[in-house]
């Protein structure tokens, strides 16, 4: 393992991390890892933003890092984000999701960060029957797009979204559908829902709006598409 000159105990990684934390103790820095650029290390901030820090810890730059290969530029930063999302997705409990399954064979699964009040989330949900008919299984995670708290109170989007996740497990899909149709529901705003945790997860994944789809390979697909487009992206043959 590489060490700082003059110190056999302090690694470059530790030196970089200590310097960042001393400069900004209010931020949550991930462990430094060697980057594709010689002499620089990748460090995540709150799991969302990536910065590239020099080995001496004195300089860094932020933004998207690309490398070139014949015929294209490749976003190395997004490749790392995709890898991170995929690893985290494998650890999630499906019991904390609201899932809509096809009656027949599931040909592909897509995970959707959703908000009950956004127009395009409602448009996507209105196509759920078509999605399921194409063999697409939809796993919903909560992402109240206006955040959790504002001016000391829960936001409207948070409270409305929580009502679906606070419903009994067997009723959540029905309650979520009602909310997306603008209907009033009787579910309470409970204190033990996973909504706030899922919102923070979405932020760490780079979600900035809804719907935001996490594909099976960990890549992030923002915005609404038609069921046929989702099927094509997921590799489902719609002609057969």
Image (cartoon, rainbow, N blue to C red):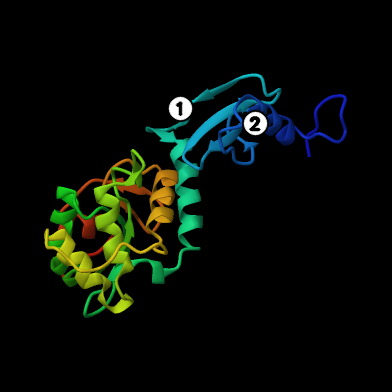
Q: Percent from the top left, x then y, of residue 237?
A: 21, 65
Picture residue at 31% right of the left edge, 62% below the top: 189
**Mark 2 surroundings within 10 Å by alpha-carbon count, few (fewer than 14), some (14 through 19), many (20 or more):** few
Picture residue at 14% right of the left edge, 69% below the top: 129
**Mark 1 surroundings within 10 Å by alpha-carbon count, few (fewer than 14), some (14 through 19), many (20 or more):** few
Q: Secondary structure at mark 2?
A: helix
> Residues at badges 2 and 1 in contact (C-beta under 8 Å)?
no
172 to the left or right of 80: left
> In this view, which residue lies farthest toward the front?
152
In the rendered image, the vertical position of residue 9 relative to residue 223, given as above or below:
above
Visible in this render: residue 211? no
Q: Quadrant of the N terminus?
A: top right
Give the quarter of the image for residue 41.
top right
In the rendered image, the vertical position of residue 165 relative to residue 2, given as above or below:
below
Visible in this render: residue 53? yes
Q: Secondary structure at mark 1?
A: loop
Q: Percent from the top left, x then y, of residue 234?
A: 29, 59
Q: Percent from the top left, x then y, of residue 210?
A: 26, 47
Q: How many marks?
A: 2
Q: Percent from the top left, x then y, of residue 122?
A: 15, 55
Q: Identify the residue under disc 1.
A: 63
> Label 2 to label 1, Cα distance in Å?
20 Å
205 to the left or right of 134: right
Q: Identify the residue under disc 2.
A: 21
Picture residue at 38% right of the left edge, 50% below the top: 199
Front-most of 150 and 179? 150
């Amino acid at each position: 393992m590489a060490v700082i000159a003059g110190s056999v105990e302090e690694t470059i990684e530790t030196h970089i991390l200590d310097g960042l934390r001393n400069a900004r103790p209010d931020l949550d820095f991930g462990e430094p890892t060697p980057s594709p650029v010689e002499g620089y290390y990748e460090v995540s901030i709150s799991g969302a933003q990536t910065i590239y820090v020099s080995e001496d810890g004195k300089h860094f730059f932020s933004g998207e890092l690309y490398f070139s290969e014949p015929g294209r530029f490749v976003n190395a930063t997004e490749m790392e984000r995709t890898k991170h999302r995929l690893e985290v997705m494998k650890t999630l409990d499906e019991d904390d999701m609201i899932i809509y399954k096809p009656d027949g064979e599931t040909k592909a699964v897509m995970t959707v960060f959703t908000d009950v009040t956004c127009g395009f989330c409602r448009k996507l949900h209105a196509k759920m029957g078509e999605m399921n008919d194409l063999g697409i299984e939809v796993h919903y995670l909560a992402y109240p797009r206006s955040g959790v708290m504002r001016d000391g109170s829960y936001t409207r989007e948070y409270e409305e979204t929580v009502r679906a996740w606070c419903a009994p497990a067997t009723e959540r899909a029905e309650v979520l559908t009602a909310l997306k149709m603008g209907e009033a529901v009787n579910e309470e705003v409970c204190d033990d829902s996973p909504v706030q945790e899922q919102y923070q997860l979405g932020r760490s994944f780079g979600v900035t709006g809804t719907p935001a789809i996490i594909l099976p390979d960990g890549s992030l697909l923002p915005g609404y598409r038609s069921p046929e487009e989702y099927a094509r992206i997921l590799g489902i043959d719609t002609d057969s």
